[in-house]
Amino acid sequence: MNLSSQTIIIAFIIAGALLMQANIIRYAIFLGGMNDVISSGDKKSTALRALGLVLLIFFLLGYIFTAVFGKPDFMMGGILFGGSIFVWIVLKIMFNLTDVVKNRTLEISEMLVGVIEARDPNLSGHSIYTRNLTMLIYKRLPFSLKNKINPVSIEYAALMHDVGKLAVPEAILNKPSRLDDDEWKVIKGHPLAGVKMLSPVKSFETIIPWIKYHHERIDGGGYYGLKGKEIPLESRIICVADSYSAITMNRAYKDAKSHEEAVAILRDCAGSQFDTQIVDIFLSIPKKEVEACVPHID
């Protein structure tokens, strides 16, 4: 085999090695995102994913060894180059399927929440609105806070935050006048009811506390008496989004307030009911972006 032929073969192998390196990086990033309420799995599936990464690294080492110490022919060079393309295609298909599953699961969750909210005309679109506002706040978080939160998980927590109201009688949900003490006690039980409903879903273990404590106050005057940093960061974010949604949406017992009125309420209650930093972040968001979060409910 002449020098030019050998050079071409080595070039094929090096190209395959570079593509395999890119595959490893893509797969590692993919694994890094597999810790949310939809993608996370049991120990066995986690071990298999890690084994896949180890094998990809092993294959890359094989490319390097063959290029440096081996005497590959055109067949070997073609197989190695084609193998890296095959892995790229398989990963692409896997990534696409994962995205499809996540999107379909979110659509089904939105539908189920819609069924729950159909019992109470006061809630129509509230959970989706809260979810949209929560994700808007998340996007504006400084890296030091954003890095602590899984976006998929907080999205589901915000969407499911009022699922416990399925356990609240419609007579209480739809009461047009002020609730009495017993009725208010039932309403205050909806976060715990939601926890009980969601607890059989093992992958929801992480977000259950966020849902349970979304009505806590920074000053400790909430449902369970948590205060300040004792309240999960995700709950503090959902609390602001939930409150803004409730203030600006029509209810049978009150009219909706304007954006400006809602902003004034959030500002006045920052440090007592709401986390001041989260409120400041929310108030920095342009009005048009906040209003774009309003869901379109048919």
Image (cartoon, grey):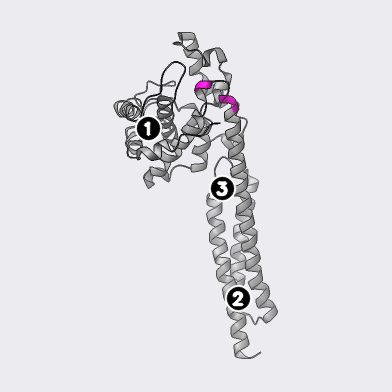
Magenta span of residues:
115-122
- Element carrying mark 2: helix
Q: Are marks 3 and 2 in contact (CB under 8 Å)?
A: no
Q: Picture coordinates of residue 91 (x, y %)?
A: 62, 58
Measure the C-alpha gap from mark 2 to mark 1.
54 Å
Identity, as a three-letter code, of the amino acid under mark 2: Ile
Q: Residue at x 46, y 20 (%)?
A: 251
Other-residue count near label 2 (Cα within 10 Å), few / some / many at <14 / 14–19 / ≥20: many
Amino acid type indicated by mark 1:
Lys
Q: Which mark is residue 13?
A: 2
Where disc 3 sits, the SS reads: loop
Circle 2 or circle 1, nearest the eye: 2
Q: Main secondary structure of the magenta part?
A: helix
Image quadrant occupied by the C terminus: top right
- Camera-near label (1 vs 3) is 3
- State the separation of the CA atoms marked 1 and 3: 27 Å
Judged from the image, the secondary structure of the residue bearing numbered disc 1 is helix
State which quadrant residue 23 falls in: bottom right
Count of number-bearing discs: 3
